[in-house]
């Protein structure tokens, strides 16, 4: 374990102990006014959708409005900094995208927030595996065909991402490291422009979440090769998992989780987590998640704290090996 990871784990334990010590008194009065849920992305994306999916039912459960406030920018840093500096009373929360939370800290120096020590984990709300797709006409139907083609002509095939340091980039670099391929990175300013060029045939492939891919797969403009989850997607039942294709460690998931500022009373955190768990267990919430190509995959405070650290460590190793740094 690195010194950084060890210090972060010590910090997380200290935060948890302080929160529990605050006792049930804080939860008894909480909430007595509206709660603000700050989102690290613009309206319309999966992060925003996840926030709004949980905000309305959570507000009803708490008896107070949960107001969604979008603060995109800085690869998640604008929203994260706002919540990290907020009063730790449970009235300002963060809905964060995993790529921002566990990748940005590795490629952006001197961040004014720490993914572990600045926050009290509350709950994971949604998880979405990635899908590797190739453009129409490329001719590959299986992952092993793609790998063999690149190994025969290293550097000839390229892949699109939404930007340097995106989960799309580090996911494909993980494949490069596993398969010995040399797929060339073509960064774009967002998923939309990347998808336009992929569909137009200017780039060869990408790995990203299902929502922007499904309509183009249905139209025959993109061909899915593998899903990077532990099981096949209901929306793509004929597409094998990466494990089925021979790459069991190509497990990549975007996740969308709620955090509170460091020092938020443990009883308040547990109240929020309990209500979120009940909401996520409903058929309505699970159906909405499935329609997005995602899963209602609940993790409470302790599990989310452990998973956050695991993801930080895992992607940090991939990023260092690939030499990815901020542009």
Image: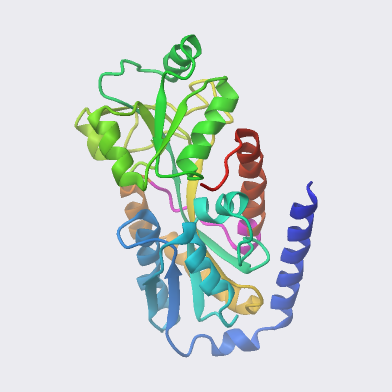
Based on the picture, tell me whether residue 162 belongs to the magenta stretch: no
In depth, the one of 319 and 34 nearer the eye is 319
Give the vertical position of 214 relative to 152 (above or below): below
At 45% from the left and 40% from the top, the residue drawn is 168
Q: How many marks?
A: 0
In the picture provided, is 215 more to the left or to the right than 233?
left
Q: Quadrant of residue 11?
A: bottom right
At 64% from the left and 89% from the top, the residue drawn is 25
**Magenta-colored segment: predominant secondary structure:** loop
Q: Residue furthest left?
A: 219
Q: Quadrant of residue 192?
A: top left
In the picture provided, is 290 more to the left or to the right than 249?
left
Q: Which residues are magenta?
A: 294-304
Q: Position of residue 130 (x, y in %)?
A: 43, 39
Q: Is residue 53 visible?
A: yes
Q: Is residue 213 visible?
A: no
Q: Position of residue 104 (x, y in %)?
A: 55, 53
Q: Position of residue 33 (x, y in %)?
A: 44, 89
Give the vertical position of 143 relative to 71 (above or below): above
At 47% from the left and 47% from the top, the residue drawn is 254
- Which colour style is shown? rainbow
In depth, the one of 229 and 70 nearer the eye is 70
At 53% from the left and 38% from the top, the residue drawn is 170
Q: Position of residue 303 (x, y in %)?
A: 63, 56
């Amino acid at each position: 374990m690195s010194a950084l990871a060890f210090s972060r784990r010590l910090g997380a334990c200290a935060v948890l102990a302080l929160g529990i010590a605050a006792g049930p008194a804080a939860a008894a009065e909480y909430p007595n006014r509206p709660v603000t849920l700050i989102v690290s992305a613009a309206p319309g994306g999966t992060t925003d959708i996840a926030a709004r999916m949980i905000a309305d039912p959570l507000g009803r459960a708490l008896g107070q409005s949960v107001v969604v406030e979008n603060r995109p920018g800085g690869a998640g840093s604008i929203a994260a900094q706002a919540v990290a500096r907020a009063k730790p009373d449970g009235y300002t929360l963060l809905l964060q995208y995993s790529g921002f939370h566990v990748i940005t800290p590795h490629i952006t120096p001197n961040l004014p927030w720490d993914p572990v020590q600045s926050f009290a984990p509350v709950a994971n709300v949604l998880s979405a595996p990635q899908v590797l797709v190739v453009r129409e006409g490329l001719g590959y139907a299986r992952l092993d065909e793609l790998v063999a083609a690149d190994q025969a002509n290293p550097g000839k095939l390229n892949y699109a991402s939404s930007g340097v340091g995106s989960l799309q980039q580090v996911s494909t670099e993980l494949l490069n490291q596993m398969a010995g391929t040399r797929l060339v990175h073509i960064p774009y300013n967002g998923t939309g422009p990347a998808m336009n060029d992929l569909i137009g045939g200017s780039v060869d492939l990408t790995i990203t979440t299902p929502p922007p891919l499904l309509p183009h797969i249905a139209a025959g403009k993109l061909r899915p090769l593998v899903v990077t989850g532990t099981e096949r997607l209901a929306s793509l039942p004929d597409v094998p998992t990466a494990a089925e294709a021979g790459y069991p460690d190509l497990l990549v998931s975007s996740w969308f989780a709620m955090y509170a500022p460091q020092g938020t009373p443990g009883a308040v955190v547990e109240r929020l987590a309990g209500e979120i768990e009940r909401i996520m267990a409903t058929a309505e919430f699970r159906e909405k998640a499935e329609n997005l190509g995602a899963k209602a995959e609940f993790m409470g405070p302790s599990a989310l704290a452990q998973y956050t650290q695991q993801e930080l460590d895992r992607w940090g190793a991939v990023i260092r090996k690939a030499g990815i740094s901020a542009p």
